[in-house]
Amino acid sequence: MKQKIKELFNEKFGTNGVMYASAGRINLIGEHTDYNGGFVFPGAIDKYIAAMINVNGTDKVRAYSADLDSYCEFGLNEEDAPKEQWARYIFGVCRETIKRGFTVKGFDTVFAGNVPLGAGLSSSAALESCFAFALNDLFNDNKIEKFELALIGQSTEHNYCGVNCGIMDQFASVFGKKNCLMRLDCRSLEHEYFPFDAKGYKLVLVDSKVKHELVDSPYNKRRESCERVAAKLGMETLRDADFAMLEAVKAKISEEDYMRARFVIGEKQRVLDVCEALEKGDFETVGARMYETHNGLSKDYEVSCVELDFLNDVAKECGVTGSRIMGGGFGGCTINLVKDDLYDKFIETVKAKFNEKYGHEPVIYPVVISDGAHKCED
Ligand code: GLA
């Protein structure tokens, strides 16, 4: 992929640039907790977006998306926002960097990626983090704090892409570390690396290939539900809410908001349980919590779909230790914790059964936990 980017860059701009990359992510547990001030437990993966960039001495960005075979040119002022959705991510990162008082000048770029789109693996966060990291390196002597880079990506989603997301994806993409998951407290922003060495188990993603679209989507509505319940409880977020508090306001909120908050309160605890279980090597508990999360995301948060529920059922029938829908929902992947000796059988079964029911095989991605945003040495 990097070779292809280099050749294309040379072809389009007649020179070379510096290569940067940033990763997609998985999340072991802690879904829809980030914008509720709770905990998440993601890691970066070996699927990434790479971009070659060269400062061009103008006040324009000239960008080429190799995967979409689409070219776009835009200026760096607010009124220069491009129409192309893919270019808005880059424009947003430039604007958010400038708004924070940092420098961005014109540059040329060619980028490509192998993070599957719409699979819940945060291809957009990988794109944002790649450019945020690069702009910091190229124009700002790396003065921008790493966390600020993640926040630049998140604000890009909010202000230029219409998704009111939390901080998990951009955090994972910027902070990712090989072989480590990270527990992030989304309120204090404290984070801790947990070496992930699941001896005897594998993590594998099963991609339903059902696409989700978070823009103008129920994702933002889920967030609004949580904010309404928090406001009823007199709190800023659901972080400090518990089941008793929720019961106390049950009559004053809608049934739907009640269900959303019930999921979030349960999920907050599940992340902590999983971290504790991992430290003891207790993968049975990790897996049990993953199934509970799936159930909550499906029944209370209502972000699953029949295909993903089916994948979850097949995993359970096969005796897979843990399985759940991963990411924002409305399609994409399940993440599965599978014993080594069950792995081949599970993959074979899930492919065959899904194919029989939905007419296409799911795509299997073994998880390799990798580094986040970086400059590529060549
Ligand atoms: C999407 C958002 C994240 C997070 C997850 C759900 O990936 O971008 O901020 O809310 O959904 O956990």
Image (cartoon, rainbow, N blue to C red):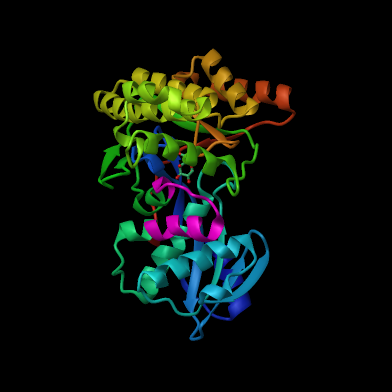
Image location of residue 224, percent across then percent down: 48, 41
Name the residue located 62 percent from the left edge and 33 percent from the top edge.
208
Q: Quadrant of the C terminus?
A: bottom left
Q: Main secondary structure of the magenta part?
A: helix
Taking depth in this image into account, of 48 and 331 the one nearest to the observer is 331
| Residue that sits furthest to the bottom in the current view | 57
Quarter of the view holding residue 376: bottom left
| Residue that sits furthest to the front in the current view | 252
Image location of residue 122, percent across then percent down: 50, 47
Would you place residue 34 above or below residue 12 in this image?
Answer: above
Name the residue located 46 percent from the left edge and 70 percent from the top edge.
95
Is residue 338 at all visible to an observer of this figure?
A: no
Horizontally, residue 254 falls left or right of residue 377, namely right
Taking depth in this image into account, of 229 and 105 the one nearest to the observer is 229
Name the residue located 26 percent from the left edge and 46 percent from the top edge.
188
Quarter of the view holding residue 269: top left
Segment tinted magenta in the rendering:
151-169
Image location of residue 257, percent across then percent down: 48, 30
Would you place residue 300 above or below residue 59 in this image?
Answer: above
Q: Quadrant of the N terminus?
A: bottom right
**Magenta segment includes 155:** yes
**Magenta segment includes 159:** yes
